[in-house]
Image (cartoon, rainbow, N blue to C red):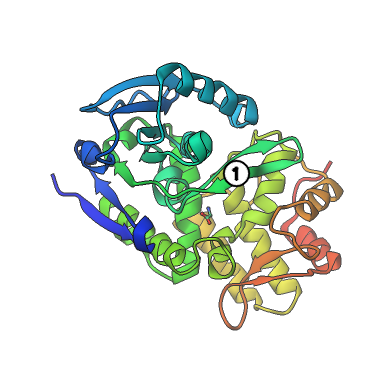
Amino acid sequence: MSTRRINVALGERSYPVVVGFGAIIEINSLIPKSAKRAVVITQKEVNFMPKLEIDSTTVNIGNGEQHKNLQTIENLVDKFAEFGLTRNDVVIGVGGGMVTDVAGFAAASWHRGTAVVHVATSLVGMVDAAIGGKTGVNIKQGKNLVGAFWQPSGVICDLDALKTLPDREMRCGLGEVAKYHFLTGDDLLSLEMTDRIARCVEIKAEIVSGDERESGRRALLNYGHTLAHALERSSNFALAHGEAVAVGIIFAAHVAHAMGRIDQSRVDQHYKIIGQTYGLKTKPDEKFNRKDLVALMRSDKKAVSGLTFVLDGPSGIEVVNGIDEKHLDQAFDAMQLNEK
Ligand code: GLY
């Protein structure tokens, strides 16, 4: 068994991410020495239980974005209190991005900050959600609008968990991997699985280390996400995050083209990488209403001044504020989104 260990360098809040088949064996080494008890937060579908050397209890949360809410946090903190979890103890999130976002937020809030360790069991979780300390839940006005930056004490990405991951969830993960492809130009699919995931973690760790609270470069990790979040919400989450990100990247390429930032050949390259290289859909089958999507994009939490997108351009990928709606219309026309 060979695992890779990547450090997320954040001074005294630095932590390791252990990637590889069988990486779960490292779990006890990531738990803070002060912890005498652990609450494991997971979902009944996950079925990937770490063997802990400290006293623990397991709490299942619901599956699906509709459970990623404040009610779930309230239920969890009730369980923490019942179990007698102290701030010296540890919360362990075992699951995909939803579980680690919720577990992280519950840990951040419990006694104003209790340690959390993440065991990512989905590809999205491994390459993105479990790394970097973004935690939170949805409210009816938007995704992840209530949350905190709370770095874990360590992250496990055990590739054994991917063996039973449904194909659709694997494809969702590839949407996020494709994002790193555009951010770095790395040919990630040429790497075998452990190295590919480790490379994605390295890219994210490097960005997070330089901009933990997203005052600059970290926003690039949202490439494709402005439309993606709107598509997810508009479809009532029938379209999964990674699928929406793949479509959102294509849309961002069309917006960049409409603004004269990139030429048609670069748009074509986006289609080739998303569609052929990563085998992802470049357009959803579902029908969407353009006006609804624009309204949702305007309410995106990243939109501090009008419509905000991460866009490709002559100096590479960067955050662009104050996008004119006519460029979105041109992009929708070019993409021929199914409209209702
Ligand atoms: N998922 C984007 C970020 O962690 O910043």
Badge 1: how crowded within 10 Å, few (<14), some, or many (20+)? Answer: some
Question: Does residue 315 appear to the left or right of 167 in the view shown?
Answer: right
Q: Is residue 254 above or below residue 178?
A: below
Image quarter (top left, top right, bottom left or bottom right) of the C terminus: top right
Residue 24 is at least partly visible in this image: no
Give coordinates of residue 249: x percent, y percent: 60, 59
SS category of the residue bearing label 1: strand
- Given the image, on which type of amino acid does mark 1 rest? Gly
**Residue under the image location 66 percent in, 63 percent down:** 252
Question: Does residue 308 appear to the left or right of 247 in the view shown?
Answer: right
Q: Quadrant of residue 329?
A: bottom right
Give coordinates of residue 261: x percent, y percent: 68, 79
Q: Quadrant of residue 177?
A: bottom left
Extreme-top residue of the structure = 82
Q: Is residue 91 above or below residue 1?
A: above
Give coordinates of residue 292: x percent, y percent: 83, 46
326 or 108: which is nearer to us? 108
Give coordinates of residue 326: x percent, y percent: 86, 67
Extreme-left residue of the structure = 1
51 or 113: which is nearer to us? 113
Which residue matches tag 1? 147
310 or 149: which is nearer to us? 149
Q: Is residue 138 above or below residue 331?
A: above
Q: Is residue 101 above or below residue 64?
A: below
**Residue under the image location 27 percent in, 36 percent down:** 160
